[in-house]
Image (cartoon, helix red, strand yellow):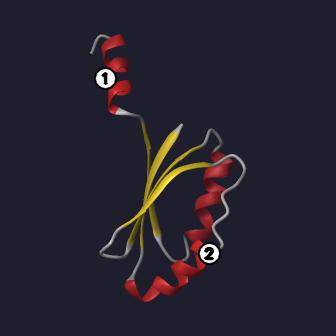
């Protein structure tokens, strides 16, 4: 399943965030597809794939002391439309 996460942090924590990024090593069951930084600062976007709730928690929890993570399961819009049509919606 694909997840899109938006991480936000306070400007005062930027140095801590950089240190965490240097150490970023996703669990074996997490496949990072792409990552983006907000050029205005304070936000980080990531698209990744996992089928494991345990890997999701292992990947997200170490960040909970310095940032907020808002994650949502996502799918490509064309696939979503096909799914809805197949369900008669």
Q: Mark 2 Cα within 10 Å, few/some/many (few <14, many 20+)?
A: few
Residue 6 appears left or right of 59: left
- In front: 24, or 54? 24
Vertical placement of 59 versus 15: above or below? above
Q: Which residue is mark 2?
A: 22
Q: Nearer the viewer, mark 2 or mark 1?
A: 2
**Residue placed at 61% from the left, 51% from the top?**
56
Vertical placement of 25 versus 72: above or below? below
Q: Mark 1 Cα within 10 Å, few/some/many (few <14, many 20+)?
A: few
Extreme residue toward the left, this view: 89
Extreme residue toward the bottom, this view: 12
Residue 5 lies, in percent from the top left, at 45, 55
Vertical placement of 1 versus 8: above or below? above
Residue 77 lies, in percent from the top left, at 33, 32
**Residue placed at 30% from the left, 14% from the top?**
85
Residue 40 lies, in percent from the top left, at 30, 75
Tally of numbered tags: 2
What is the number of the mark on residue 23? none
Report if the CB atoms under discs 2 and 1 are less than 8 Å apart: no
Which SS class for mark 2?
Answer: helix
**Residue placed at 59% from the left, 81% from the top?**
19
Q: Which residue is mark 1?
A: 81
Q: Earlier in the sequence, mark 2 or mark 1?
A: 2
**Picture quadrant of residue 63:** bottom right
């Amino acid at each position: 399943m694909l997840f899109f996460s938006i991480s936000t942090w306070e400007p005062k924590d930027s140095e801590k965030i950089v240190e965490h990024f240097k150490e970023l090593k996703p669990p074996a069951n997490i496949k990072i597809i792409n990552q983006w930084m907000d050029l205005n600062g304070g936000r980080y976007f990531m698209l990744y794939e996992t089928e494991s709730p345990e890997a999701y928690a292992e990947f997200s929890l170490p960040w909970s002391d310095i940032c907020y993570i808002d994650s949502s399961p996502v799918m490509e819009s064309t696939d979503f439309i096909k799914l809805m049509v197949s369900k008669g919606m």
